[in-house]
Image (cartoon, helix red, strand yellow):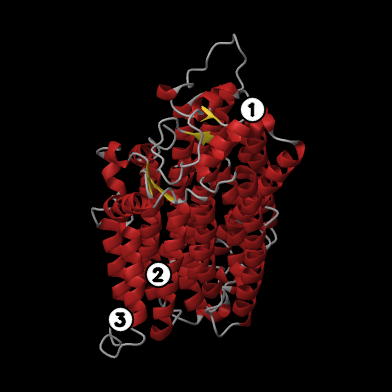
Amino acid sequence: MNFNSLVDQAIDNTICTSVPLFGPELVICVTIFVLLATRVLPLVEKIDAFYLALIGLFVALCIPFGGQPWRMLASSDEFARVEIFSGMLVYDGFTVFMRGILLVFAILLLLLVRLSKVFDRRDGTDIYTLLLGATLGLSLMASANHLLMIFLAVEMASVPSYVLAGMRKDRRLSSEAALKYSIYGAGTAGIMLYGISLVAGVTNTLHLPTVATRLATMWPELSVEQTYVLALGGLMIMIGLAFKLSAVPFHFWCPDVFEGASAEVNAFLSVASKAAALALLVRVVIGVGVIPSTADHSTVALAHVPPAVETTFLNVSDEQPGKPSNGIRGVASGPSRAGPAGLRNFMGLLIAVIAAVTCTFGNLAAYGQRNINRLLAYSTIAHAGYMMMAVPPVVAMTSQNIDGAEKAVAALAMYMVIYLFMNLGAFSIVAILRDQLGSEEIADYAGLIRRSPGISICFAVILFSLVGIPPLAGFIGKFAIFAALVDGWKVSGHGYLMALLIVGGINTAVSLFYYLRVVRVIAIDPEPENRRSSEGSLVSRVQFGYVLLVTIPVVFFFFQWDWLSQLARAATTHLLS
């Protein structure tokens, strides 16, 4: 095949396959361009940027090309794995599901920004542009299939976030938060990029599935030096992911940034950024550790893969000659194992340790907080640990029970949806009370139930759901994660999965106390004298309506969890098989 044929094939693949499946991201790009035009073109300068951004997000969510998340309930077969743009990105049910979460959250966040009016109209255009730009980067993170795309997507999501953290021009802490966030982010980005270069130097590729095949073929012949380089590169990449997840020990930016930034920006950092980072963690773990034997890799991406790679794959399998097959070897039986069991066990154990430490530290550090934003920041760190607990079972069951591994990812997807409404509800209440009380200190919420009983009840429901108490949706999310740990332990027999389950259960009980302290201040502590002199509710009907809108799903999903489970399961059907 000559050069002209390769160019024609690449163009045809891009126009006919890649662009239609990339439709929502293209709509976001067009919306960003229109928003920027409103700042420079006199004819459209008077158009409210809020409506333009809202229309763009709705179009991106509902357009037929690119796929809507709810269509997976009817048929998940149309969301089979397809690599687009020569393997840089991957389109499957998980991509569509994560894209749907990010777009729904962006719509709700735009409504909150508009409702709180924390930014004036002219700054609002910049806010909407930055939010859409960061959402675009997060969407690319959720579908990244190439190490270089991972780095670019992380930076596309991070740079607008640095600016958003410093948008409160009237607060010195806001500028300090932006400075800290950008410095820490730049440092971890450099470390991550260096780790990517080390992995690429050993494997001679950046395409994740090809990295898996190269590791499989090279593993028996790797020198000690090459093994150390791979391990160092993997740890450096993990540092970049841990920074986005606020995982210990790379959490140090989170409390200070959350205290300095506005509650609206904190909601974005705690929900959208965490969801995309977790999706990227799943992509990296699966992409490096597993290669689907029936994968539809592009010609460009696998141009240098040896033709006998599947035979070599079986030769480096952990199964010894004469032992029975585990039922997943061969072309028709799904993914094969990349590398020896020790490599997979180390990867699963590393993530399990980080998840356990992150969860424990977040819950313990939240006890002494007096500022509600800092308390929710440590709560975010703890919940990042909870959600990371779904990844080790995926690693443990990949080589023995593909269906169980996909169910573990589905449990994580369920938690993401529930977490979206829990944290968005919490930060929306903080934003509304900030405007009314002029404070974000927990002590200033004293006696709030006497003046605004509706919003106080909603806040209590959300906080108890964050604990995981039934009959609230937070219980369903944690139960799904813990069930995945039990399934992984039954299939693999790894003791660290059961230990992780115990750590998660203990932390759930521990977290009750600091969430309950906030509820006690709202419901039991006496109302301050200066507030008693005012009359009427502290919250308007429109504000209460928004809070109610994001609180209802926290209760609804407990009773209708089967529908959410089916949607999450359909999203992960073709993730491994």
**Residue denoted by label 1:** 341
Q: Going 60% across and 61% down the picture, which residue do you hit?
A: 377
Label 2 amino acid?
A: Leu
Amino acid carrying label 3: it is Asp
Q: Secondary structure at mark 3?
A: loop
Say which quadrant the C terminus sits in: top left
Residue 27, percent from left and from top: 31, 64
- Give the Cα distance between marks 1 and 3: 57 Å
Q: Which residue is mark 2?
A: 112
Q: Nearer the viewer, residue 201 or 386?
A: 201
Mark with earlier residue (1, 3): 3
As drawn, the residue found furthest toward the top would be 322
> What residue would you read off at disc 3?
48
Identify the image quadrant of residue 214: top right
Image location (x, y in percent) of residue 321: 61, 12
Query: Residue extending furthest front?
Result: 2
Residue 6, how many percent across, how many down? 36, 50
